[in-house]
């Protein structure tokens, strides 16, 4: 099954059509039911969307809500105890982990896939095939005044340069700035920013002078609307591909993708089952939405970590504690695409 990563604007959560069937059993022998709350990275969203669809088909009495508020926004909710799982396109920051600890939220980091950042231009651009990391740094670093392609490289034409990239809550923004500029969150502010990668795709597609970046899966989904550039990090020009990302030869713009799972979440049978499903069924579904799966032994390692935390969560959960399956009253659960 090929899952599209195009997301309907305003979608609050993913609701799969229940196709019948018995569903998995909870640890006590009953049928799984209840809500699972997920938020975070727009890059990881398509993976969670695919997992949610398949999990709910197998377990029609569950409801998986997947929000898209960016990696940083997702961690805010996660560390406040509002979500069970947080999607992330970068590791959790020290200050975010401290906030989780302050709120009594224990968690584990789980790798789920590989991704490569794609640097793209408008298809009408016929003069650039590859940019060096130094050229990208000069364009994107704080204080940069580069606004014409002729300033990027000698010999490029005198054409306006306009920039498109993720917003500051995005883990992709964090990763790109650290890898290219050399300091996380260090970026010029005068560019079209969005947490919605589809908005960036549309912007680059409609602007002849555009230069942008986002996850490889969004390029793959829109390859006929964009021009993919190679990146030269000092060892020659390499374009992102499944093989280059998996082998880490597309450096320095290959990265792992994560979900973070809380102990409170894993105390709920439906959440534990969902995360195990995520890791056991991950390879095929991850590839179906354009990302690169881990090796089988790597998924097994991640599954062992989750089961260890789940065991501890079950032992420490207060007796009779009921899981909170609904969002707090009045909360806007609209996914920010």
Image (cartoon, rainbow, N blue to C red):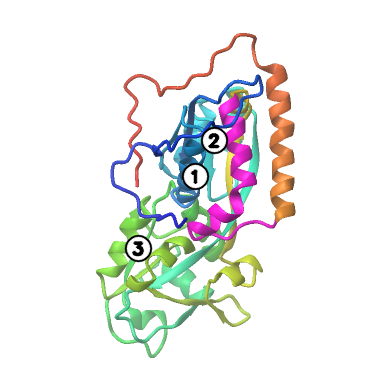
For label 2, count other residues whose C-alpha is less than 10 Å away and answer few (under 14), some (14-19) or many (20+).
many
The dominant secondary structure in magenta is: helix
Residue beneath the point at 33% across and 36% down: 334
Helix, strand or loop under label 1? helix
Instruction: Kindly indicate whether the residue at mark 2 contacts the one at mark 1 (C-beta within 8 angstroms).
Output: yes
Q: Is residue 59 visible?
A: yes
The residue beneath circle 1 is 48
Which label belongs to residue 85?
2
Image height of 83 relative to 130, above or below = above
Q: Nearer the viewer, mark 3 or mark 1?
A: 1
**Label 3 secondary element:** strand
In 3D space, how far apart are the residues under numbered discs 3 and 2 (Cα atoms)? 29 Å
Residue 259: x and y in percent read 57, 43
Q: Residue furthest front?
A: 21
Most extreme residue toward the bottom is: 155
Left or right? Give the position of 1 relative to 299. left
Q: Is residue 162 left or right of residue 59?
A: left
In this figure, which residue is indicated by the disc labeled 3?
Answer: 164
Q: Which mark is residue 288?
A: none
Image location of residue 144, percent across then percent down: 40, 67
At which x and y percent is residue 138?
Answer: 46, 72
Between circles 3 and 2, the one closer to the viewer is 2
* Residues at circles 3 and 1 in contact by the CB criterion of under 8 Å: no
**Distance (Cα) linking label 3 and label 1:** 25 Å
Q: Residue furthest left?
A: 206
Q: Residue at x 48, y 40 (%)?
A: 52
The stretch in magenta equals: 269-295
């Amino acid at each position: 099954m090929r899952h599209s990563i195009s997301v309907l604007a305003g979608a609050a959560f993913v609701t799969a059509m229940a196709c019948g069937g018995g569903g998995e059993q909870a640890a006590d022998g009953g049928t799984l039911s209840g809500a699972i709350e997920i938020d975070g990275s727009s890059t990881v969203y398509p993976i969670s969307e695919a997992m949610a669809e398949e999990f709910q088909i197998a377990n029609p009495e569950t409801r998986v809500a997947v929000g898209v508020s960016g990696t940083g926004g997702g961690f805010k909710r996660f560390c406040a105890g509002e979500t069970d799982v947080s999607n992330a396109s970068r590791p959790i920051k020290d200050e975010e982990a401290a906030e989780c600890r302050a709120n009594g939220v224990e968690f584990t980091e789980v790798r789920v896939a590989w991704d490569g950042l794609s640097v793209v231009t408008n298809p009408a651009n016929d003069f650039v095939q590859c940019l060096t990391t130094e050229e990208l740094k000069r364009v994107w670093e704080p204080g940069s005044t580069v606004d014409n392609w002729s300033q990027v490289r000698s010999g490029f034409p005198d054409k306006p340069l306009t920039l498109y990239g993720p917003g500051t809550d995005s883990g992709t923004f964090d990763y790109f700035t650290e890898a290219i500029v050399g300091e996380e969150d260090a970026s010029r502010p005068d560019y079209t920013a969005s947490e919605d990668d589809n908005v960036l795709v549309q912007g680059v597609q409609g602007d002849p002078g555009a230069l942008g970046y986002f996850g490889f899966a969004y390029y793959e989904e829109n390859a006929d609307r964009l021009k993919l550039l190679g990146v030269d990090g000092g060892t020659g020009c390499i374009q992102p591909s499944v093989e280059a990302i998996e082998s880490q030869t597309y450096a320095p713009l290959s990265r792992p993708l994560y979900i973070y799972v809380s102990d409170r979440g894993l105390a709920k049978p439906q959440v534990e089952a969902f995360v195990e499903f995520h890791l056991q069924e991950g390879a095929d579904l991850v590839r179906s939405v354009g990302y690169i799966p881990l090796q089988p032994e790597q998924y097994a390692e991640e599954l062992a970590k989750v089961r260890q935390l789940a065991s501890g969560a079950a032992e420490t959960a207060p007796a009779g504690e009921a899981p909170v399956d609904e969002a707090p009253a009045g909360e806007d659960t609209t996914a920010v695409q």
